[in-house]
Amino acid sequence: LSEDRRAKEHAAAQNWKPVGAERVTGVNDSPSIAFAQHTLASLGFKPGAADGKFGPKTSGAVKAYETAKGMPVSGAITRDLLIKLKDDPIHAS
């Protein structure tokens, strides 16, 4: 490979992410995702089944929740999102 081509391939490899990685940042374990899904559903958002699998419905529910709470909108299950859900009044009783 030419030096230019090698540099381009190296840059592409450095920026590679698995499919879907942009939606799940930091938290991708099933219990955390199921907790978020259950809580979002209890709050009236529609994440789909609380099956611990992250998909488009869960991402959409996360985005709607983030928007409603004035959070930066990512659609991702993050540590900050889980804390916010845990501290939501639904869990205060």
Image: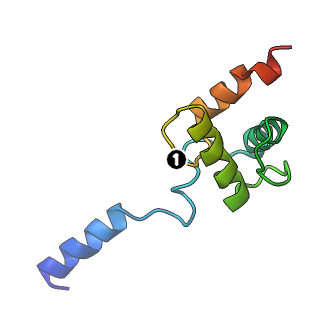
Work out whether 3 lies above or below 82: below
Decide if residue 33 is on the left or right side of residue 65.
right
Please give the name of the residue rendered at 68% of the width and 61% of the height, measured from the top-left corner: 56
Quadrant where the image shows the N terminus: bottom left
Quadrant where the image shows the C terminus: top right
Please give the name of the residue rendered at 64% of the width and 25% of the height, measured from the top-left corner: 83
- State the image quarter where residue 54 is shown: bottom right
In this view, the residue in front, 36 or 27, is 36
Work out whether 11 lies above or below 59: below
Decide if residue 34 is on the left or right side of residue 85.
right
Where is residue 3 drawn, in percent x and y? Answer: 13, 78
Q: Residue furthest bottom?
A: 1
Where is residue 74 drawn, in percent x and y? Answer: 52, 47
Badge 1 is on which residue? Answer: 74
Q: How is the image coloured?
A: rainbow
Q: Secondary structure at mark 1?
A: loop
- State the image quarter where residue 36 is shown: top right
Decide if residue 86 is on the left or right side of residue 75.
right
Q: Residue furthest top?
A: 93
Please give the name of the residue rendered at 84% of the width and 48% of the height, measured from the top-left corner: 50
In this view, the residue in front, 57 or 25, is 57
Work out whether 71 lies above or below 21: above
Q: Residues within 10 Å of mark 1 (few under 14, many from 20)?
A: some
In this view, the residue in front, 50 or 90, is 90
Decide if residue 19 is on the left or right side of residue 16.
right
In this view, the residue in front, 72 or 36, is 72
Residue type at the position of mark 1? Ser
Where is residue 84 drawn, in percent x and y? Answer: 64, 26
